[in-house]
Amino acid sequence: MKNGITEKDFLELTNAHTPKSFSLEIENIFFKNQSSYIEAVLEYCKEKEIEWFASAWDIESQQFLRKYDLKYNKVASPLLTIEPMLEEIASEQRHTFISTGMSELEEIDRAVEIFKGLDCPFELMHCNSSYPTKNNNANLKCIDTLRQRYNCDIGFSGHEVGIQITVAAVSLGATSVERHITLDKYMYGSDQYSSIAPMELLKLSRIIRVLETAIGDGRKYLREEEKEARKKLTELYWRVRK
């Protein structure tokens, strides 16, 4: 590989600062040709205590996944308007991440209606489904638009180059983050360039952990660690006045 990073290197890097979950995209043909890969992912995630789940692209694949008793489900953006698929997923009543790329608000309304009707917990994910997404098309203010309209957690599914936009999404209150990962951005595939490399994943994960503590609760009050500084600096004013 051009960047010299192997699959083994990648797993060791991510182990240094592990994401909380790992997701796959699954189609029926995948099982016929590479089903052993799922078992390998399962074993590794179990060893590292990572919740793994998958984005199935057809009903048969979704039914296949049930044997793993996954904690989460994922609806990919192209499937948001496929009601039979939504009903199949929502019937499991697992917490579901619903990507909202390439959709209108009215279509999201219908998807939310289906999940609420089947009493399935869900989290919408703001998304622009262009590869790569230009910075001026990220429209991160839509995170708040969706939050106010649906009164639910809103995550961010990013397809932009780099990690800056994803970091900004977390700062704006995104409750979950999805990024595609590649071992080499020069590999064949439509989304390699908009994916992040292992070192970018490591950096992004560390930044998000810092932001989780830095965002705070929004309450304004005199904090304990400010009191001593306040005392010293206000006393300085009165000394000068004398």
Image (spheres, helix red, strand yellow):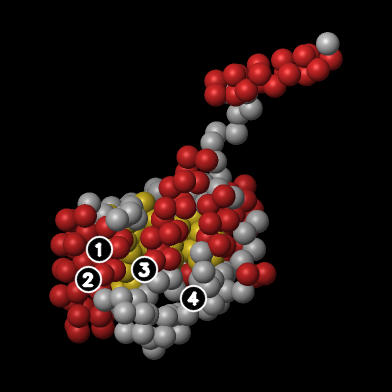
| Nearer to us: label 4 or label 3 | 3
Q: Which structural element holds mark 2?
A: helix
Q: Secondary structure at mark 1?
A: helix
Alpha carbon distance from label 4 to label 3? 13 Å
Residue tagged by mark 3?
198
Mark 3 surroundings: few (<14), some (14-19) or many (≥20) residues within 10 A: many
Residue corresponding to mark 1: 12
Please give the residue where the numbered disc 2 appears in the rendered image. Answer: 8
**Whether residue 113 can be seen here:** no
Left of 118 or right of it: where is 110? Answer: right
Q: Return the disc, 3 or 1, that comes first in the chain's sequence.
A: 1
Q: At numbered mark 4, what does the secondary structure look like: helix, strand or loop?
A: loop
Tell me the number on the disc at residue 194. Answer: 4
Amino acid at circle 3? Pro
Task: Say which quadrant the C terminus sits in.
Answer: top right
Residue 150, image x, y percentages: 57, 49
Q: Which corner quadrant of the image does residue 67 belong to?
A: bottom left
* Position of residue 3 measured from the top left corner of the image (x, y, whole percent): 36, 80
Q: Are marks 1 and 2 in contact (CB under 8 Å)?
A: yes
